Image (cartoon, rainbow, N blue to C red):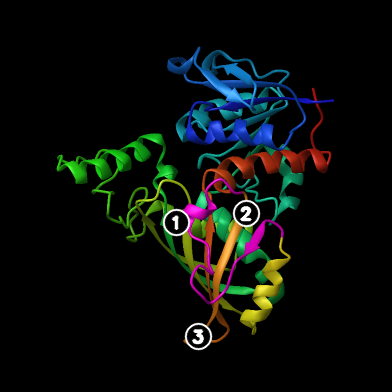
Amino acid sequence: MGYKVAVVGATGNVGRAMLEILAERNFPVDEVVALASSGSTGREVSFGDDDVLTVQDLETFDFRGTDIGLFSPGSKVSAVHAPRAAEQGCVVIDNTSEFRTDPDVPLVVPEVNPEDLDWHTKRNIIANPNCSTIQMVVALKPLHDIAKIKRVVVSTYQSVSGAGKSAMDELFNQTKGVFVNDTRTSEQFTKQIAFNVIPHIDTFMDDGSTKEEWKMRVETRKILDKNIEVHATCVRVPVFVGHGEAINVEFAKPLSENDARNILRIAPGVMVIDQRENDGYITPVESAGDDAVYVSRIRKDTTIKNGLSLWVVSDNLRKGAALNSVQIAEELIRKRLIKAA
């Protein structure tokens, strides 16, 4: 028996990726519904190679009889409609930041903490972590199981697709403008993004960190281990799709780079490409369209006791958002935590 699945925010980057991945992975659906704001009602979106879905109005949609809701409409919209869907019996998997710190909502990466799905019934909502957090914890979990992580210092190199389609358009238009000597305006970012990097993602907080940096800290501790200290610097870079992260890890006990490499080679969701030569590592461009979290540049940090450094790359629209949401739904089915209405 198949499931009725609603994709909320179906006209956005992540929503379209959700529809694509549901079809790619042959998710057991009887019916897929595309939902968005009233301004998008009547538009068409693709589902698989042959099917076209007409977008319906989220505001008036009745979720009764819908088994799974994959939400990515923005935090304010999720705050209103995710609880409504959950109360109507739909299991909500929400990709926004709205519920990530809610103690009654599990924050899940299936390769890392699938056991937390067992208590999703508290609110009938499951939160999808931040894109930069997801790829980091997928890479760190296998190492933490062996050597226990004490502290993480991470610098991210985040693509503009993490800020939506308008941000991608701004990078394209600014880049084109540089070559034709047009005035370059910045609407989606605080400074020019073309041929530049911006150490500012989300709003600033009282301690000088940005909310994106705060998210990486609190989400890693909720997912992986509440005792891990995390210090992040999050940077937007002129790349369309794919996030890179330079991660420095301090362990509680020794872990050699060779052991770390071998552990990660057999870890779920991880692909190790680590050769100390030209082209022996993965860049964001090469990760685009793939599902894996790629790990490269594994090496010893001799400045601290039990330290290693890693370079971690992943497609932020897939594993960082849409794929992780679909994998959560698959895990709910595998664990028999959900039944078709």
State which tag comes first along the sequence, 2 or 3: 2
Q: Which residue is mark 2?
A: 292
Q: Position of residue 269 (x, y in %)?
A: 67, 56
- Which residue is depicted at the point 53% across and 63% down? 312
Q: Is residue 126 positioned above or below 30 on the image?
A: below
Q: Position of residue 144 (x, y in %)?
A: 66, 70
Other-residue count near label 1 (Cα within 10 Å), few / some / many at <14 / 14–19 / ≥20: some
Q: Main secondary structure of the magenta part?
A: loop
Q: Is residue 278 left or right of residue 327?
A: left
Type of amino acid at the residue the image marks with label 2: Ala
Q: Is residue 168 visible?
A: yes
Please tell me whether mark 2 or mark 1 is closer to you in this view.
2
**Residue under circle 3?**
304
Q: Is residue 313 left or right of residue 232?
A: right
The secondary element bearing badge 1 is classed as helix
Tell me the residue that label 1 is attached to: 214
N-terminal of the pair, mark 2 or mark 1, is 1
Does 276 appear in magenta? Answer: yes
Alpha carbon distance from label 2 to label 3: 30 Å
201 horizontally vs 50: left or right = left
Q: Residue 87, relative to residue 60: is it above or below? A: below
Closer to us: 171 or 334? 171
Residue at image position (40%, 42%) is 163
Q: Position of residue 101 (x, y in %)?
A: 55, 48
**Residue type at tag 3:** Ile
The quadrant in which residue 210 appears is bottom left
Give the residue at the far front of this rendering. Answer: 278
- Sequence-earlier tag: 3 or 1: 1
Q: Is residue 283 depicted above or below 118 in this figure?
A: below
Residue at (65, 51) in percent of width and height: 109
First to last magenta residue range: 268-290
